Image (cartoon, rainbow, N blue to C red):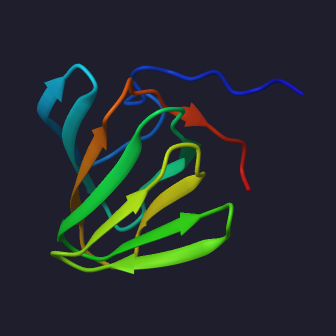
Amino acid sequence: MNQPQPVKDASQLYEVERRAQHVARPGFRITELQLSATQKVPWHTHTNVSDTFYVLEGHMRLFLQDPKEEVNLKPGEVYVVKPRRPHLVTNGGTTSLTFLVLQGVGEYDFVPLVSR
């Protein structure tokens, strides 16, 4: 079975309503994403960096593996996903979800996973 190959830019792998890069430094970045009610960030993991999610507007449903877990976040709430932990980000509401994702410290990659 082929291992998924890490990519440095995942923007072509899934659609979002809006994406804005606020900080991009070696080993650290902050990106703002806006998802419609039907959009998602597909299952993936990161080799070296953690994802810190901070919800600005809407309701985030975050699904995780190893161990299996579901996290629901409202505006102002934060959750950290450690490196190598598979996760899927979905919009848990009927309006747009807007959130920041802080990624670091380390070299960024996005490792897509087959459907789980």
Nearer to me, 81 or 5: 81
Residue 42 vs residue 49: left or right?
Answer: right
Q: For the N terminus, give its image quadrant.
A: top right
Residue 35 vs residue 2: left or right?
Answer: left
Q: Position of residue 42 (x, y in %)?
A: 53, 49
**Residue 63 figure quarter:** bottom right
- Please name the residue shown 18% across and 76% down the image: 75
Q: Position of residue 31 (x, y in %)?
A: 21, 41
Q: For the C terminus, give its image quadrant.
A: bottom right
Residue 74 vs residue 11: left or right?
Answer: left
109 lies above or below 85: above
- Please name the residue shown 23% across and 75% down the image: 77
Q: Position of residue 71 (x, y in %)?
A: 46, 76
Q: Position of residue 51 (x, y in %)?
A: 37, 49
Nearer to me, 6 or 95: 6
103 lies above or below 65: above
